Image (cartoon, rainbow, N blue to C red):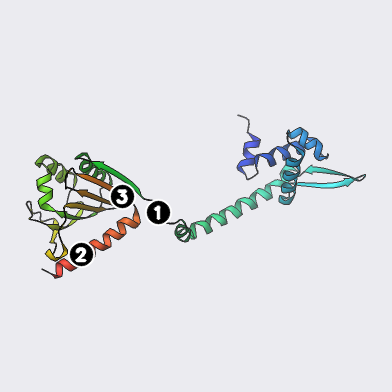
Amino acid sequence: MATDIPQLLTALGLTPTETKIYLASLSLGPTSVQEIAKKAKLSRTAAYDAIESLQQRGLMSSFLRDKKRFFIAEDPENTVGHFKETIHQMQQQLETWKRILPEVKLLSGGERPTVRFYEGKEGLHAVFHDVAKLMPKQMCEIANLDDVYSALDPAVLADVRKILDPLKTQIRVLHRGAIRAPNAHMAFCELLPSLGDFHGDIWIYENRVAFVTFVGKPMTVIIESVPFSDTARVLFEAAWLVCSKGK
């Protein structure tokens, strides 16, 4: 299969216009900008701009003959050094870019979180399936267990137990209400009464925070965001520490 020369030159860093001008000039030999523009099927203005750029790259040159300026493309063999240098510079710039990525991320105005909203029990199943897909090594939960057991039927709770294997996922639960199904592989800590009451469930896993409310029709919001999950995780740790000391 014949090599697509124009596509190769653009892949090496030339613009489509520069590619047309270089190849037109190469085929014509020393000639005027008018002839090069005509051969490349470009305007004289576009041709002049491309020729100037190619001259700066060292891929074209010009000379005067009888007070008339001629332009000529650099020999293809001599262009190899230019492209090698371009690739070398790009590699250096790529390494610099990789090194400053954390700084660049700070300029982006923060991560734009992905938010999913559900109504009804399908939202709970969405959370369960999301956890099953990610299989996190750790999961933190803040739950009103009385609400959980009154809102969810035994079949749903059985599905949760199948998905969340405490032997694979370290699970810690800050809870309000009685523990119905103690598990030696899960850590529980009761929330202090002074912290107030709530009616819902919060799951923190990987880069997700899932909020479930059981007041009226169940509603679920899953936020996919590292800053949100990191913040929620710090608050969980602070509450765990306070409640552990308050026992």
Q: Which residue is mark 2?
A: 239
Helix, strand or loop status at disc 2: helix
Q: Looking at the image, how many numbered discs can be counted on the residues?
A: 3
Q: Crowdedness of circle 3 by 10 Å Cα count: few (<14), some, many (20+)?
A: some
- Front in this rendered view, residue 220 or 77: 220
Residue type at mark 3 is Ile
Left or right of residue 139, residue 102 in this image: right
Q: Which residue is mark 1?
A: 111
Helix, strand or loop status at disc 3: strand
Mark 3 vs 1, N-terminal side: 1
The disc at residue 223 is 3
Residue 123 horizontal/vertical position (percent): 23, 42
Q: Say whether residue 131 is visible.
A: no
Q: Are marks 3 and 2 in contact (CB under 8 Å)?
A: no
Quadrant location of the N terminus in the rendered image: top right
Q: Residue furthest bottom?
A: 245
Residue type at mark 1 is Glu
Q: Find the distance from the CA under tag 3 to the CA under tag 1.
A: 12 Å
- Front in this rendered view, residue 75 or 145: 145
Q: Are marks 1 and 2 in contact (CB under 8 Å)?
A: no
Residue 109 horizontal/vertical position (percent): 44, 56
**Vertical arrangement, residue 99 with respect to residue 24, above or below:** below
**Vertical arrangement, residue 10 with respect to residue 139, above or below:** above
Q: Find the distance from the CA under tag 3 to the CA under tag 2.
A: 21 Å
- Residue positioned 56% across, 54% down in the render: 91
Residue type at mark 2 is Ala
Place residue 102 in its image quadrant.
bottom left
